[in-house]
Structures are given as structure tokens and as C-alpha cells.
Image: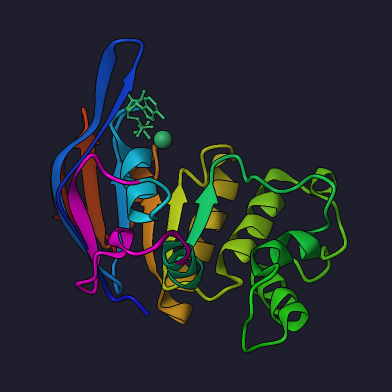
Amino acid sequence: MIKNITCKELEKSFVGDGTKTIALKSTNLSFQKGEFTAIIGPSGSGKSTLLSLIGTLDGPTKGHITYDGQEVLKQKKNHVADFRFQEIGFIFQQFQLLPTLTSLENVLTPLFSRKVPYNKLHRAREVLEQVGLGDKMNSLPSQLSGGQQQRVAIARAIVHKPSWLLADEPTGNLDTETGEKIYELLKNLHAQEGCGILFVTHDPVLASKANRIITMKDGMVISDKVGSKQ
Ligand code: ADP
Ligand code: MG
């Protein structure tokens, strides 16, 4: 269970048709599992890039990330995939549920072909109960509201008991009230499960409720402070 994530001189650039975009510039950051961190900043400021690097979905152009001191990306590909499975859960703005699968089946997908020390079906039912969807286990995504679909996505993100949840604008497609409920659910998961949470949002009101608020602009962290409200 990873407790600390450290980014050292982290940089990511993309090259395409003769142009180079530096999405993230020499970033130094450290995250502790006990923190609930909000990441805020305008579109294109590098928030998603930072999250995908931290989640080992992509590799940096320069610099590195260590997880409790280990540079995971230096390991073999299947080790990186195992690490991601054990430690990281992702939640996206677009939910990314499979439309032909029920809630229960969607939640089971990360466990497919994985050996785990618990009963998969039991665990999937348990997390769906936890996010308040005990009565929607057999519904298809099209039969659910946006907020309910995001709850299924959250259940899927926590089913494998990750130590970190990376949420990329999880409330971006939801109305304010539903967004607040999703935010509260993530806060409860943070308190109950002890997951470290990185929460990207456009909403300054939601961000202000976090323990720590990181503001990004043009691929750089321009402010990193402790939240005023807890
Ligand atoms: P944010 O999530 O804050 O909106 P992103 O991290 O998605 O910002 O993007 C930061 C910058 O990097 C933007 O200029 C974006 O166009 C660019 N970028 C992101 N991903 C890619 C990619 N796969 N290929 C080329 N450019 C990219
Ligand atoms: Mg983004």
C-alpha cells in the first residue's frame, strides 16, 4: 500500500506535426496518502497529464515519479500493470462505463483475469452498496442518471482496493447538487478506506473543501496550499 508519491522535475511534452507542446514543466510535488488534494486550473494547464503520469498510464519525457521511494516505471511492463491494478483507481468525467454491461458487470471488469484473495462477486456487490446503488446492480448505464453512472464508475474504481484514487473532473458532467454528492462520496471513501485522493475540478467551491489545493497554469504548479475549510 503506497503511502507517498513524489514527482521530481517531472516534464511531459507532446510532439506532433512539427509542433511541440510542453504539457507539464519541471514539476516537483509530493503527495501523502492521508491528504485529499484538489487540483484546479484552466483547460489545457496540464491537470490530466499530471494525473496520467501519476497513474502510470503514460511516462514522463523528463524527471521521474517515485512511489514510497520506488521508481515503478523502470520495472517491466507487467509489473507496472500489476502495480497500477494494486495501487491506483481512476475516475473520469465521461464515466467510461461499458454500455452493454450492467452496473455489477461494469464493476467486475477490473477484476477480470486477476487473482484476488476475496470473492469477486461479493466484493462488487459490497462496493455498489457502499456507493448507494444496492438497488441498481442489474441496470444498464442507459437506465441510470449521470450521478448514478458516476457512482458505478466510483465503485469500479475502488473494487480492487487501491491505495490512491485519481479523479479527473469526476463532477464535470454533473449538475451542482449531484456533483456535491459525488464529492461527499469521495470524501467519505477517503475517511473510511484511507485512500489518497487527487481530485481535478473546475469548481472552486468544491476545491476549497479539500485539505490541499494545487493550482496549475500553463503546465506549471502556480500555487500549492492547505485548504481553509475542512
Ligand atoms: P488539462 O487537463 O488541464 O485540461 P491536459 O493535461 O489535458 O490539460 O493538456 C495539457 C496540454 O497538453 C494541452 O495543451 C493539450 O493540448 C496537450 N496535450 C495533452 N495530451 C496530449 C496528447 N496526447 N497529444 C498532444 N498534446 C496533448
Ligand atoms: Mg483534463
Residue 222 as seen in the image, left or right of residue 180: left
Q: Which residues are magenta?
A: 59-78
Q: Is residue 107 visible?
A: yes
Instruction: Name the residue at 71% across, 70% down.
Output: 128
Q: Position of residue 8 (x, y in %)?
A: 13, 54
Q: Of residues 76 and 141, which is closer to you in this image? A: 76
Give ligand 1's quarter of the image: top left
Find residue 180 and report its horizontal and vertical position in percent: 51, 52
Work out whether 22 lies above or below 170: above
189 horizontally vs 133: left or right: left
**Which residue is at 86% across, 56% downward?**
139
- Residue situated furthest top in the rendering: 18
Was residue 64 drawn as part of the magenta stretch in this picture? yes
Point 24% across, 64% down: residue: 71
- Quadrant occupied by the N terminus: bottom left
Q: How many marks?
A: 0
Q: Quadrant of residue 58?
A: top left
